[in-house]
Amino acid sequence: MITEIRLISFSSEALAEAVRLFGVSNRDRYFREVRQAFVQPGQPPVVVAEVCGDGSDATDTLEFTAAESAAMLILLCRQQGIPLPHHAGKSLRLIGGEICLAVANRVYPWIEASDAGTAPQEFETPDGA
């Protein structure tokens, strides 16, 4: 089986935008403004944001679950036109102080199934070797 693994890294500005989009799309987590968003190390990493509610300058600190964090990053990728395979596994990683969305996609699962129990076939490369 062949697996493609891709890491998409998000700066603190991109993370703040992801939190804002998540708040706009989720009425239970709605807020007017994101002042700051950062990542706390852990397994998985935890996204924390300082936000302002409607009609107030007081800030609240929100801590998002891993599922909410992944959802907000996926939402930002969709808004920015970054393609994500629907059936690929997605997880969060902290690399160099930035949160990353790890996307693991089994690109050619049919290779194992169709070649199971058969001897390896020889093939010719484009240069004839």
Image (tube, rainbow, N blue to C red):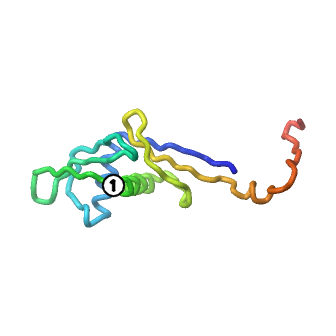
Name the spot of residue 10 as percent of width and height, x first. 40, 42
Q: Secondary structure at mark 1?
A: loop
Name the amino acid type tagged 1.
Thr
Where is 3 relative to 68, above or below? above
Q: Residue at x 21, y 46 (%)?
A: 35
| Crowd band around label 1 with a 10 angstrom C-alpha radius: few (<14), some (14–19), many (20+) | some
* Residue hosting label 1: 65
87 vs 123: above or below? below
Question: Residue 117 occupies which quadrant of the picture?
Answer: bottom right
Residue 21: horizontal and vertical position, in percent? 32, 56
What residue is rendered at 63% in x and 53% in y?
Answer: 106
Q: Residue at x 36, y 42 (%)?
A: 42
Between residues 122 and 129, which one lies in front from this camera angle?
A: 122
Residue 53 vs residue 95, the one in the foreground: 95
Which residue is outermost to the top? 96
Q: x%, y% of residue 87?
A: 56, 60
Q: Position of residue 110 (x, y in %)?
A: 73, 58
Query: Which of 67/129 is in front?
Result: 67
Give the quarter of the figure containing the C terminus: top right
